[in-house]
Amino acid sequence: MNVPRLNSKTIGLYLHIPYCRKKCPYCSFASTAGGLFPEKEYTESLKLELEKVLKNERLDKDTKVESIYFGGGTPSLFTPSLIGELIDTARSLLTTSAETEITLEINPDSATKEGLRELKGYGVNRLSIGLQSLNNQELKTLGRLHTADQATGAFKDARDLGFTNIGVDIISGVPQSSVSEFAETLDKVIELGPEHISVYGLTIEDKTPFARAMDNGSLILPDEETERELFLMTIERLEAADFEHYEISNFARPSRQSRHNTRYWSGGDYIGLGASAHSFIKGRALENTTDRDFGRRWWNVTDAADYIRLMEANSSSISDEERITKQQVISEAIMLGLRQTRGIDERAFKEAFQGSVQEHLVQKGLLNEAGNLASVKNLIYSSNGRLRLTKEGMLLSNEIY
C-alpha cells in the first residue's frame, strides 16, 4: 500500500488536560470536573501516546516542533513538574529551539505565583489566561471560580515573573450584561497590556446547563443588533490600542499572533495528545506513485479514564479517523482562510487546486456566474490578489461558508 512520504518537516503539538475544578455552564469541551484526578497516570499516558504516534507517523529528531500547547480543561491544575516532564519528553523525541512557542492555559483561581515561576523554569514561554471578564457579576453568571481582582492579580504575577508573551480570553454577550459593562472590561484588559487578546461571543452548546436554561426561557442572550455592536466596538477599541485584528476572534501586538492556532488556520500539521484530542497530517506525495494523498485526521476517545486505560494496556486511544478528500481540503482552505483577516491568496489557491476560489464559491452558491457578489453582497471582497471577509462578513461567517 502506498503511504505518504514524510521528510523533514514541522509540526505543532497539542496536549489536552481534561480536568477542572468545576464545569462552567457554557462549556462543552471534554473535561472532568471535581474531586481528585490521576495527574501522574495521565502524564505517563501522554508520554506513551507521543512515542506511539511519532513511531506510527515516522517522525523523529528531524522533525521540528514550532509550538507546544497545553489546553484544557485546566492545565494549571497539574503539578508544574509534570508539565516539565512532558516538555522534556517532547524535546527528547523531536527538535525544539529557543523560538519554540510553549503555551499553557491557566485559570486565575488555580495559578499561584510559585507555580508560574516553576512553569517558566521548565520552558513555558507563553500563557493564555482565562479571564473571561473583569466584572464580578459577569464572572458569577458565567460560573467562574475567580474574581476580577484574582484575574488581574494572576496577570500581574505572570508579568512580574518575566513572562513577556501573555494572551487573555474574554467573553462578550454575557446574559443580563450591558454593552457599557463589556466596554469597561475591554478597557481594563487593554490597560493590563497583554500581547494577545481573544474575544469570543458567548455561544450556547448542546447539552450544557446554559442550553437547558435557554430552552426553559431563564437565559436570554443579546439580540443580533447588540452582538453586532459588541463585535464592531471590540475591533474599533482594540485596533485603536494598536492590536492587529488577525482572525475573527483574535487580536495581537505585532509579531505576537498565536503561532499554534495560526498553524490550525493555515492547514499545517499538528498532533493532538490526550482524551478527545484531534490530529491532522496534511497531504503530500505518495511513495512510488505520482498520485497525491490529501491527508488524514484522527481523534481520541473522549473519556479520560478510558484514555488512561488504553494507554496502560499499550492499545490505541484513537476513537475514529478519516481520509481527507480533495473537496474537503478546498472547503477547509476557504473556510479557514476567510477566518483570517489576511484572507485567501487567490493565485496560490488556484495553483494548489487548479481552479479559482471564485469558481468554488460559485459552485457553493455564494457568487453568481459573473463573479459578482450575490447573497453575500458587502460581505466578501477582493483586493490586491486576496479574497477577504468584510467586518460585516465576519459577523456572518458561519452563514457565509
Image: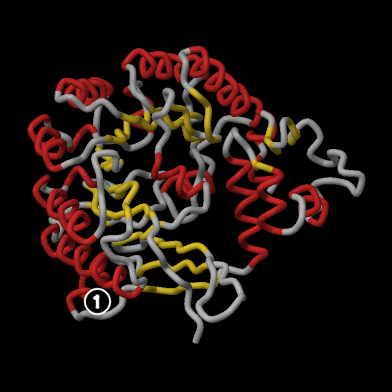
Mark 1 crowd level (few <14, some 14–19, many ≥20, 10 Å Cα): some
Rendering colour mode? secondary structure
The image position of residue 167, as x and y in percent, is: 34, 30
Taking depth in this image into account, of 157 and 203 the one nearest to the observer is 157
The image position of residue 9, as x and y in percent, is: 40, 58
Taking depth in this image into account, of 333 and 95 the one nearest to the observer is 95
**Which residue is depicted at the point 18% across and 62% down?**
42
Taking depth in this image into account, of 351 and 170 the one nearest to the observer is 351
**Which residue is depicted at the point 34% across and 47% down?**
66
> For residue 343, what is the image quadrant?
top right
Total count of labels:
1
Note whether residue 174 is visible. no
Under tag 1, what secondary structure? Answer: helix
- Up the image or down, 328 lies above or below 88; here it is below
The image position of residue 354, as x and y in percent, is: 74, 59
The image position of residue 376, as x and y in percent, is: 79, 39
**Which residue type carries mark 1?**
Leu
Query: With 169 as the anchor, is 391 left or right in this view?
Result: right
**Which residue is depicted at the point 59% across and 71% down?**
292
Note whether residue 177 is visible. yes
Query: With 55 as the anchor, is 215 left or right in this view?
Result: right
**Which residue is depicted at the point 74% across and 34% down?**
379
Taking depth in this image into account, of 217 and 388 the one nearest to the observer is 388
- Residue tagged 1: 310
Query: With 193 as the anchor, is 82 left or right in this view?
Result: left
- Up the image or down, 181 lies above or below 277; here it is above
Q: Residue furthest bottom?
A: 1
